[in-house]
Image: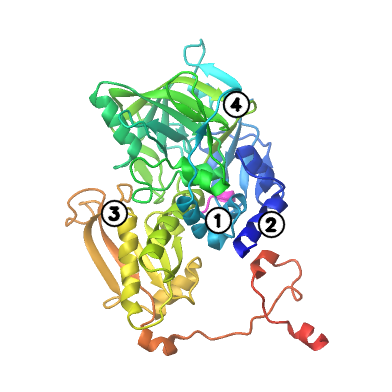
Amino acid sequence: MNKRTEAQHLIRAAGQGEVCDLRSALDRLANYPGQLLETSHEVDPNAELAGVYKRIGAGGTVERPTRLGPAMMFNTLKGYPDSRVLVGLMASRKRVGLLLEAEPSRLTQRMADAVRNAIAPVTISGDVPCQEVVHLASDPGFDLRTLIPAPTNTEGDAGPFLCLGLVLGTDPDEGHSDVTIHRLCVQGRDELSIFFAPGRHIDAFRQKAEARGEALPVSINMGLDPAIHIGACFEAPTTPFGFDELSIAGGLRGKPVELVDCVSVAQKSIARAEIVIEGEILPNVRVVEDQNTNTGHAMPEFPGYNGPANPSLPVIKVKAVTMRRGAIMQTLVGPGEEHTNLAGIPTEASIYNALQDAMPGFATQVYAHTAGGGKLLAVIQVNKKNAFDDGRARQAAIIALGVYSELKHVVLVDGDVDPFDSDDVLWAMTTRFQGDVSTMFLPKINGHVLDPSQTPDFNPALPAKGVTCKTVFDCTAPFHMRAEFERAKFRDVDPRPYAPGMFDDSEFDTPVAATRSEADHD
């Protein structure tokens, strides 16, 4: 049994059972102190819930004060007596590791392996959990606004949002399917708006259907095995047009994701989802995102700013909502650490696989830093062995920028720098970096439309919104000067006998020198 398999086995054993859906994921977390907090104190899903979690566990690019903390289950919701909401399931890299059976520092490699060993989803029939309760939009009294406790993150949001709604759509020409998390705002009793960032595959499906005057059937799946949510966040070229991201979750779990036919539209849904919204994206129908509030804002986005309300978004006409009994609504706080992990770990895996293909073994770690929301900033650790590798390090950065088009900044560090430790990375930038010789600028390249600096107003040289100057910060020591940049070496001592209970045994996977007391005893 290799080290990674052993780690997976230990995590699974400690968690007492495999994870196959959201409920089994929560069961696993319940075995790890400090990872899941439940409260029955009443909370209002309108801005208050997010305000609570901002202080307890959101982290990321959320306005300070915030911190990393446990996932939270809110059992008593104002206005929704029979509902409960989970937030922050993946808002900790350690927690994601527990759920995906990997050490936090090896999640990149775990995801990279899943892409290479993907398992396609399968369709099943019969009674399935996600259809235990069925609400048809044609029923009297049907209303999304009272049926689902969709939260608002702030008081300036355009409306209630489904922040972790995984949209499943199918190419009307080719028949292949795609899943993506999109910005979904509740607009009325049976209508949602949907925001598509440029290049999204389901938007391409919608455009094909719309060109024929046809609606596009979709399902919106909420409350899922975290492997499904994280696997769905890969992007091209790792998952090109026609690649079903659900197969990555299959690769993570070693078995296919199960789908079932929807009850009201010609589409599939995820059989073990907590809540499924079935509907159709209407052709040639658009809506102002903040039509009900006129705030001018959509919701907090991953860079940490309120995204502007879009003046013209496609509309999903809802046909049905299906649920498990006692369904759990799952959400996130927009710019928090949960977004970093959802978007960032797939980003890391995509870059890591590309670098291994191009220069095997040279890049040892990739971290999609939380300051960039998992998308805009990457730290790449490289292992230089000769002077030629000075150039290979910069080539690695160029490969990363080519593989992940939304990436804006790349920081290169040596093997003695921990890419997951911001203090260590900034230390390398301070002592191994000179701005005029260690920086590479790549101007006028497409980036991400939600970064407010990527506009002609900020930089008149940019031709359009979402175009940016990409930058490589080479914070590696020149190979010929490596002796001058050797870090001070300390004795590697096991501190646990001196500070009982302070350390987690998992921090000591590699042997350390005997402590002085142990040596004296021998």
Q: Which residues fall within the magenta stretch?
A: 55-60
Q: Secondary structure at mark 4?
A: loop
Residue under numbered circle 4: 128
Q: Which mark is residue 93?
A: 1
Q: Nearer the viewer, mark 4 or mark 1?
A: 4
User: Is residue 178 highlighted in magenta?
Assistant: no
Q: CA distance from mark 3 to mark 4?
A: 46 Å
The disc, 1 or 3, on the residue closer to the chain's N-terminal end is: 1
Q: Secondary structure at mark 3?
A: loop
Q: Nearer the viewer, mark 2 or mark 1?
A: 2
Q: Amino acid at mark 3?
A: Ser
Residue under numbered circle 2: 10
Q: How many residues crowd mark 4 within 10 Å: few (<14), some (14–19), many (20+)? A: some
Q: Nearer the viewer, mark 1 or mark 3?
A: 1
Q: CA distance from mark 4 to mark 1?
A: 31 Å
Residue under numbered circle 3: 453
| Residue 361 locus on image (x, y percent) | 44, 70
| Residue 341 locus on image (x, y percent) | 49, 52
The disc, 3 or 4, on the residue closer to the chain's N-terminal end is: 4
Chief SS of the magenta region: loop
